[in-house]
Image (cartoon, helix red, strand yellow):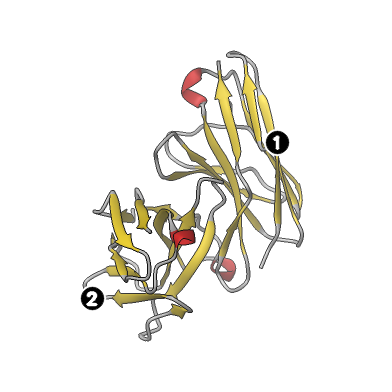
Amino acid sequence: SAVISQKPSRDICQRGTSLTIQCQVDSQVTMMFWYRQQPGQSLTLIATANQGSEATYESGFVIDKFPISRPNLTFSTLTVSNMSPEDSSIYLCSVVDRTGRAFFGQGTRLTVV
Amino acid sequence: AQTVTQSQPEMSVQEAETVTLSCTYDTSESDYYLFWYKQPPSRQMILVIRQEAYKQQNATENRFSVNFQKAAKSFSLKISDSQLGDAAMYFCAYRSARGSGGGADGLTFGKGTHLIIQP
């Protein structure tokens, strides 16, 4: 199994500002995934981050709003840019191990005021 | 595109009893993974059980078992001897097995079932 450290665990931000969420994995992984969980909703995939290439974004998510970095095989960041109250959600990073199991970080609870 | 449907927004069960959570999915692929995740109020996503589509045998993990019906595209979770600590949101999820190491795709989640355990 993979151990994922995600931070911050929560934050309250002013609208118009940006927040960068960090995700550190205890082993090297090819793909890292970022999800959003809006209040009372399920998880939706934002993008897939592959080391050494640009992230692949799902429909409805764009790089200008959610830039992602993947500098090495154990680390990734997701930035939520120019935030509005609609961005208030839980953001989670995830990795998949060699057996196909997906593991998640603890999540970042973001509140935009 | 794949879809995952959980038709039970909320389920309630007495402690020590058995409960079954339903999940159906739609896909045109033949090789994939199915998962059940538990999310307690701490919001940590905890993997409960995993099923590989090519395996006919239903997966089991202690008190948790699945009924995987590939032709019917059904994947229900049975929790036996329910405990208070089982109270949480339960999400059914799908992932394609294509790509390098099977990890090329992210998960598609259902809307979740809120499980309540009555003492």
Circle 2: residue type: Ala
Which chain is home to disc 1? A
Determine whether the residue tagged by mark 2 lies in a helix, strand or loop: loop
As drawn, the residue found furthest toward the left would be: B72
Q: Secondary structure at mark 1?
A: loop
Q: Residue at x 44, y 76 (%)?
A: B63
Give the x, y percent position of residue B66.
36, 75
Crowding at label 2, few (<14), some or many (≥20) Cα neighbours within 10 Å? few
Residue A70, placed above or below residue B68: above
User: Residue visible at 69% across and 31% down?
Assistant: A20
Nearest the viewer among A45 and A48 is: A45
Residue found at the far front of this picture: B119
Position of A95 compared to A61: left or right? Answer: right
| Chain identity of mark 2 | B
Residue B68 visible in the displayed image: yes
Q: Is residue B98 visible?
A: no
Q: Which residue does the numbered mark 2 point to in the structure image? A: B71
Q: Which residue is mark 1?
A: A8
Residue A111 vs residue A68, the one in the foreground:
A111
Residue for point 61% across, 23% down: A81
Asked which quadrant contains residue A65, the reply is top right
Residue at the spot 58% in from the left edge and 34% down from the top edge: A109
The answer as to whether the residues below labels 2 and 1 share one chain is no
Task: Specify the quadrant of the image occupied by residue A101.
Answer: bottom right
Q: Are marks 2 and 1 in contact (CB under 8 Å)?
A: no
Kindly indicate the quadrant of the structure image that contains residue A16: top right
Q: Position of residue B77 (x, y in %)?
A: 35, 69
